[in-house]
Image: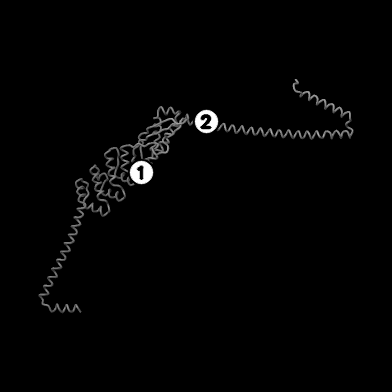
Amino acid sequence: MHMLLISVVLSSMPCSTILAQRGMADFFSGNALWLVTLVATLIVSLAFVAVFVRYFRLWVQSVTTGAGIGILDLVRMSLRKVNATEITRSKIMAVQAGIYDSDGLTTKALEAHFLAGGNVPLVILSMIAARKAKIIDLSFKRATAIDLAGRNLLEAVQTSVYPRVIDCPPKDSKRPTLDGLAKNGIQLNVKARVTVRTNLDQLIGGATEETIVARVGESIVSAIGAAETHKAVLENPALISKAVLARKLDSQTAFEIVSIDIAYISVGDNIGARLQADQAEADTRVARAQAEGRRAMAVSQEQENFATIEESRAKLVQAQAEVPLAMAEAFRSGRLGILDYYKLQNLQADTDMRAAIANTPGRR
């Protein structure tokens, strides 16, 4: 209905009015397109200005130092959630120290190490320290591998340049000294200091400081035990150091032993004499136990002999009790006469008399 009314109104209007309205519509349509284009251009310009302002300082530093990182590189880092400031400043430090892309230190490599969770500034500082020292061959690939393995790369490089001293035993140990026993039984108390530097080739997977301390302590005790007397060790403590160094204790460890020095040595207890005394006491107790056993056996045998004697006496009494019965039977049977009986009594009396005379005190 409304469309019909509009068409009627338009058909009733003059042609000039219709043409004027069409011109105004075209004008406003062109202005709207131009306005949209202007706004879009303004937004893009503002975004470019914002990006330029944000990264202008880093870009200027990169350009002036020859780091080779452009504005678009910085924008791409932000899109990939990479810390552009950290990467740029690390690259600048490397370039200023003479480490370039030809050494493997490219911007993409730094970004990859950052995304892998590595510490980029620490890696760069470590490579710079190694390059300045001129005694360590530390490539970017090895440095990133050590850093991702969880090792403190900068500390390792510093230890390689300036060796570290390890106390053996450690200061927080329960025992203040290492105790060794010479062949003559004298105890020696020793403190040692081990000078080590980092072995970067074995830093990944190599044993730590605790292993070095344990190996050195074991070797010192063994070296003292191999000495004939404690005096030989006291006269020349270097014997211990030479014996320990000859064992290659730094094998499969993250360190290289530079030297082993005996810082303190003293004479302890006479363990050999104490052991001999304890052994003599033990032997005495064993001998006493054996003698007591033999005494008990002798007493037992004596008691058995007494029992045998009493048994023999009982048998004798029993046999003597049968004599009168046998004599009575002999009287009854006529085999023994009265005269024979008296002769037997006289013989017995004579025997008793002789025995009494023999047992008289003072008789010679």
Relative to 31, say whether 254 is above or below: above
Which residue has dot 2 on it?
A: 277
Helix, strand or loop at mark 2: helix
Image quarter in which the C terminus is found: top right
Helix, strand or loop at mark 1: loop
The image's mark for residue 204 is 1
Image quarter in which the N terminus is found: bottom left
Q: In the figure, residue 315 lies in which quadrant?
A: top right
Of residues 168 and 205, the one drawn nearer to the viewer in this rendering: 168
Of residues 363 and 26, the one drawn nearer to the viewer in this rendering: 363
Relative to 310, say whether 34 is above or below: below
Crowd around label 2: few <14 · some 14–19 · many ≥20 (10 Å): few
Where residue 318 sits in the image (x, y, percent)?
A: 79, 35
Q: Which residue does the image show at 36% across and 39% down from the upper left?
A: 255
Q: Left or right of 362: which side holds 197?
A: left
- Mark 2 or 1, closer to the camera: 2
Where residue 170 sits in the image (x, y, percent)?
A: 39, 38
